[in-house]
Structure formats: C-alpha cells, structure tokens
Image: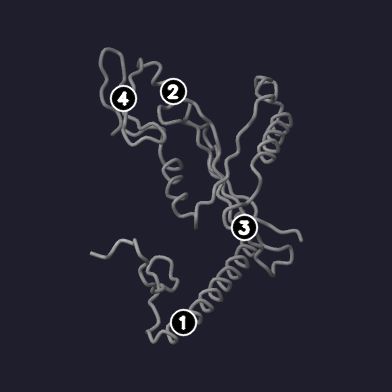
Amino acid sequence: MGGQVGLVGVLHTWSRDLSYHPHVHFLVPGGGLSADGQQWLASRPAFLVHVKPLSKLFRAKFRAGLQEAGLLNEVPQHLWRNDWVVHSKAVGNGQAALKYLAPYIFRVAISNNHLVRLAEGNVTFLYRPSGRQKSRLCTLPAEEFIRRFLQHVLPKGFVKVRYYGLFAPGQRQRLKQARALLAAQLSTETEAELVSIEAESHHLGQAPDRLCPDCGRPMRRQKLKPGWPQAP
C-alpha cells in the first residue's frame, strides 16, 4: 500500500571552526499516512530505511538536479566517484532534534560572545570541537576569518528550511488526518496499558499508579532486585 510521509529539511553550511561544510538535516516521522488516509503506517522503532542504498540514491538525485539546473560542470567530477554519507538515527519524539536545529535557522555562523580578541591583524574565537566537552581557541588572519564567515551568508531570498510531503503547505488536511490517527492510537495504547496496570494492581492489592509527568504514560511499581541501588 502506498502512503505519504512528511519531511522538514534544514540547510547547515558550517562546521564549528567556521569551515565550509554544507549538509542538510532532515526530520522524518517514523511512519506515514496510508494512501486512503485511514491508517498510520508505523516503521520499526529504531529503523526507517537502509542508509547505504539511500546514500547512493541521494548522490544520484543531487547530480540529476545539478544537471537539470545546468550546474553540473561547476562540481569537480571526482566527487561523483566518492562515497556520499546519509546518516539516519532514531531521535525519540523529535523535540531534542528540533532544539538542536533551531539555532542554525535563526542565527549566523558565529555569535559575538565567541569572539575573544582582535590583535595584530588576527581574530581569535572560541569553539568546541564535535564530540568534545572542552572548548578550544582558533586564531586566523582577519581576511581568512572574514572569508570563512561570508561563506555562510546565504543569498537574499534563499529558503533555508523546506517542508515536504505531509508537512508541505498544501497538505494540511492530510496532516490533520495523520495527527488524529496518531492521537487515537496513543489514546488506545495508553488506555490498554492503564487497564493492564489496574488489573495488576488489583491483583497485588495496590492502588493504580500515577501517570508520568513527562510522557503521560502510566508508571509501574516494581520491586527492587538484588544489586539495584537503594533510594536515599
């Protein structure tokens, strides 16, 4: 059965030391709306698609797009022989990913509070290498600093965030259908879980547990097993 998914794409052009590193982040729901709009077709919890064939497909689509725009000769040909990387990772409900991407949408490549000093024609700024907790200093000639910074100034009118599928402006009705189906599915799952916990609590002679204030799902009481840390 064919269906429809939604994507939000965000362009990001810089690395943390202001080097030119263009890439795109996509937020993709773990599933899609069925073709008839009556079902939400969920993916597996921690898997969406195979990334290796997706990487080749993305490279081919990108090349075809450049060729259609008449820009293919502007790109060194050896890049089409290199492996391209598409990374796919489950990120829960997506809130953390949105929080991560938000600064790249509304700010420039570097903020003033990262600039440490300007002396003897050099600019020194603070940045934190990816995967590390400790920040480092980078000192560049002023001209090189300006060159790096200007690489990330987008042309006037350039659209940095794009919406596809269910998130496209013309698909609001189908997005509304998907939300309703997801809400009903979550309600059914929560109700079934509540019934199960109430039955279990009744069997144990306990009152039903409260709902978690973060996710809204029922919390279970469970005996501590040997070796588990005791509450203070």
Instruction: Report the residue marked by disc 2.
Output: 148
Residue extending farthest front: 226
Q: Earlier in the sequence, mark 1 or mark 4?
A: 4
The residue at 42%/27% (across/down) is 18
Residue 161, by quadrant, is top right
In front: label 3 or label 2: 3
Instruction: Report the residue marked by disc 1.
Output: 200
Q: Position of residue 22 (x, y in %)?
A: 53, 31
The residue at 67%/41% (across/down) is 54
Q: Position of residue 105 (x, y in %)?
A: 46, 42
Residue 184, by quadrant, is bottom right
Q: Secondary structure at mark 2?
A: helix
Q: Earlier in the sequence, mark 2 or mark 1?
A: 2
* Mark 1, other Cα within 10 Å: few <14 / some 14–19 / many ≥20: some
Instruction: Report the residue marked by disc 4.
Output: 137
Could you tell me how many numbered marks the image carries? 4
> Residues under labels 2 and 1: Cα distance?
62 Å
> Residues under labels 3 and 4: Cα distance?
43 Å
